[in-house]
Amino acid sequence: MMQVAEQALAQYKLEIAVDNAIGQFKSNPSNNTLYTLIIVISQLPRDTCGMIADAIFANLRGGYRRVPWASDPLDPLRKGHFHMATKAFLTPPGTASFLNLEKPRIMPGIVNAEPRYSMSLIFDKAAQSSPEFRILQDACAEAARDFFKGKMPPNMRSCFRDGAEKQGYKAGDIFIQPWSKNKPGVVNRARQEVIDYTEFHAGWTARAFVRPFAYDQAGNKGIGLFLDVVQFLKPGKRLDGRLNATEAFPQDKYSQDEEDEEV
């Protein structure tokens, strides 16, 4: 009985938080109130309150167009039409690359851009056949249909890109590049929070929770992915060409201890 009462109280508090976030966003549309609204709504269970979240975003979507965003016209969160999924989706395990998870980095080619946390995940044919990959594809397609009202624009940019586009990647592989302005949570295989990032490199197998979003900005229309959390699963062959010090040197006379040589 006590557990049921606690759950009911938690649900009530969450509903109050959602109401407050909606009111704040409507009265003062800004970056901060938008993020607060997204964070609060993301806590709603999909099976019970997800439809409420969808209705809220459908009702407020027009409000995003009126938000007086600041600089960076290439950022899909600024000065453009924007809609993000209320649910995060788990990717299949893929090969991690271009890791900017400990510190944000300014992406090249974007004028006056804010630093972002980001990574790439490369999926081979097996990963592309997984249920997780198909679910993520469906979620991105749904976000596009919803935002563009079923009329897909020509030359719409996809968040799923062929490996042939990137030097060092393989044609036929698919890669994504989710990002976030807020530091994503990162854990190891044991789901322990990562503090030391030095052991992780391009080539590790990892997976992530990502949120699809649709955008229409300065003539650029497409689907992108926000990065929520990352889990590193196992090490793999380095993609950056660097050697692992513990494996690089041969086992020869120079690597023997002096005592071993005397014997």
Image (cartoon, grey):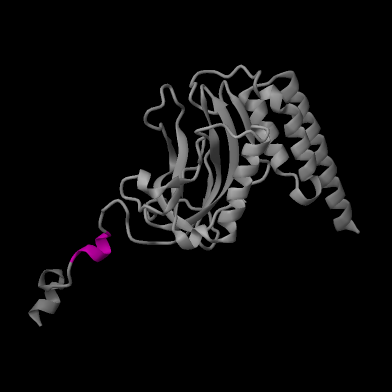
Residue at left offset 78%, top offset 29%:
20
Q: Is residue 77 visible in this depiction of the protein?
A: no
Residue at left offset 41%, top offset 26%:
110
What span is in magenta?
A: 244-249
On screen, residue 121 above or below 41: below
Q: Is residue 245 found inside the magenta-colored segment of the image? A: yes
Rendering quarter of residue 70: top right
Nearer to me, 238 or 64: 64
On screen, residue 123 above or below 118: below
On screen, residue 137 above or below 205: above
Residue at left offset 88%, top offset 57%:
2
Residue 124 in percent (x, y) is at 44, 58
Quadrant placement of the N terminus: bottom right
Residue 207 in percent (x, y) is at 51, 55
Residue 79 in percent (x, y) is at 57, 20
Rendering quarter of residue 211: top right
Q: Is residue 157 visible in this depiction of the protein?
A: yes
Residue at left offset 59%, top offset 41%:
212
Image position of 23 (left or right of 204): right
Looking at the image, the residue that sits furthest to the bottom is 263
